[in-house]
Amino acid sequence: MPYLIKKSTMLEMKSHWPQEFEATSSHRFRHPHDMQFGFSYSHYVINRHKLHPPTIEEIWTEYFDVNRNGVLDHLEMLTVASMADGVTTSETSIQKIKDCLQPPNAVKTIEKDTRDGKLEVSETLHPFITLDSLKKCKNVTEKLIDNVRRKKTYELMSEAEITFHMLSDNPAYALGQMLNTRARRTKFLCINDDMKNPSLKLHQLLHELFLAFWPNRSQFELPRHLQNRYLHIDEYYLAQQQVQKIYLGLLLVVVVLVSSIYWRDSIRIVGRQKVTRARTSSPSVLKRERIKADKSVIHKSSTSASSPRASRKSDADFVAKKME
């Protein structure tokens, strides 16, 4: 059974009963205190005028400013006067309403230089009658709201155009219901699934009934060669979470690999820099070591020359060794 709704009307309902709608949304399954959608919406549409009388903005847009220029001309002023007075109006009433709606005139004075001196020129500006001008005239707006024709926003119809069936597990009874549905091609069709353990034959009968009424798939249905992977929305959400976890794991692996490669390359670069520094500094180090060695040799030779006893002793030892 289709329900065609108007968004602005639905928002009005939620603004009137926010707690009830919030409680209904919190229930996953039907609850005794739920806002039954079809019942609530239909009765609100029928009785909406009691809660929401037409506003002056709606009246202005729908009845008065028909050319959509934002101001009232002479012909539109006659409509305002006629609606404010009811069925008939008079020239006196029209003038009173016009005086009430007409904003005060503005006088503009300009000085002009002439041969005879300065000349003051006065201009009288007559402002247009706008929606703001209409709002300021309270007695007229009240009459307009009271006398405006309230359009009927709904249409009550008999149940002759509605077919409603509660399908049970009895195949013979269900077959009779479906044949009756084929015979009475009503405007609205509602089939309520009250089957506990339906048989394959009953499924086939229901499928054939749907194909008889709607042989072509709508734009919202999958093609015949495709099928939904997930039966329930919870399964779909769970699968999406698994995919996100896989992507996150792959991202972590990539981050670890990039970090390890960067760390390895950094160590290699630092090692090469140390070797290069050692190579560049080795000649100077060798030169310093040679200088130190030469200095130590010179120091030893000078020490041996300055001690003759030690030299004589060494010569005597050398001669003794030679005699031996």
Image (cartoon, rainbow, N blue to C red):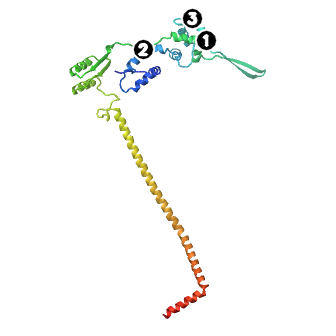
Between the residue at mark 3 and the residue at mark 1, the CA separation in whole angstroms equals 15 Å
Left or right placement of residue 190 versus residue 280 in this view:
left
Between the residue at mark 3 and the residue at mark 2, the CA separation in whole angstroms equals 36 Å
Crowding at dot 2, Cα within 10 Å, few <14 / some 14-19 / many 20+, comes out as some
As shown in the figure, which amino acid type bears the numbered disc 1?
Cys
Crowding at dot 3, Cα within 10 Å, few <14 / some 14-19 / many 20+, comes out as few
Residue position for label 1: 100
Residue position for label 3: 90
- Quadrant of the image occupied by residue 26: top left
Residue position for label 2: 46
Residue drawn at 44 percent across, 54 percent down: 261
Residue 321: mark: none
Q: Report the number of discs.
A: 3
- Mark 3 or 1: in front is 1
Mark 3, secondary structure of its residue:
loop
Spot the residue most to the right. 116
Where residue 30 sits in the image (x, y, percent)? 36, 23
Spot the residue most to the bottom. 323
Residue drawn at 53 percent across, 67 percent down: 280
Where residue 43 sits in the image (x, y, percent)? 41, 15
| Residue contact at pointers 1 and 2, CB within 8 angstroms | no
Q: Nearer the viewer, residue 161 or 283?
A: 283
- Quadrant of the image occupied by residue 220: top left
Where residue 284 sits in the image (x, y, percent)? 56, 70
Sequence-first tag of 3 and 1: 3
- Quadrant of the image occupied by residue 80: top right
Is residue 7 visible in the rendered structure shown here? no
Is residue 315 visible in the rendered structure shown here? yes
As shown in the figure, which amino acid type bears the numbered disc 2?
Ile
As shown in the figure, which amino acid type bears the numbered disc 3?
Ser
